[in-house]
Image (cartoon, grey):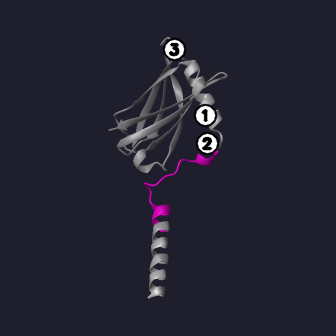
Amino acid sequence: MIVALLAGHVLAVLVMVYVATRDRSFAVEPDYYQKALHWDDIAAQQRENARLGWTVAIAVGSSTSPLGQRTVSCRLSDRAGKPLEGAIIDVIAFAHVRADERLAGVMESQGSGVYETTLRLRRKGLWEFRLVVRRGSEMLTYSEQRPVK
């Protein structure tokens, strides 16, 4: 009886380990431990974001290519609302339902403070977009969650 109970417990633990490591909807923030260790740097970047006063407006195209690609664009402007040119924008996007499947791209300038890239957004639902905007020696980090239909 004791051996059967112990064997059942071991089997249950093995099943849980398998589910935890194979479930595609389960995700852990990449480098979460390093981010926690460098929390002061993140707080300093948030103060820099506030000092810059730049605004970012993200838009996701409604039309999808046969491969599931959509246009993701953002409008970048300064504190006064004037378009900002000459920026390099890196984007990471992921659907919350499959947060371990992250897409990355670089947004290219389309003029008048508008930047675009195409990403394979096949899944509908809530997506998170994380941007790193570099312009000269200045850097802004931005994150936004928005539904993709």
| Residue 48 place in picture, x, y as percent | 60, 24
| Residue 100 place in picture, x, y as percent | 49, 50
Q: Residue furthest right?
A: 137
Observer-nearest of 45 and 78: 45
Figure check: 22 above or below 49: below
For disc 3, the marked residue is: 79
Residue 70 image label: none
Look at the numbered disc 2 and give the secondary structure of its residue.
helix
- Distance, label 3 to label 1, CA atoms, is 22 Å
Residue 35 image label: 2
Q: Earlier in the sequence, mark 1 or mark 2?
A: 2
For disc 1, the marked residue is: 42
Name the front one of labels 3 and 2.
2
Looking at the rendering, the stretch of residues picked out in magenta corresponds to 18-36
Q: Is residue 97 inside the magenta stretch?
A: no
Q: Residue furthest front?
A: 2
| Residue 143 place in picture, x, y as percent | 49, 33
State if disc 2 and disc 1 touch (CB < 8 Å): yes
Q: Amino acid at mark 2?
A: Lys
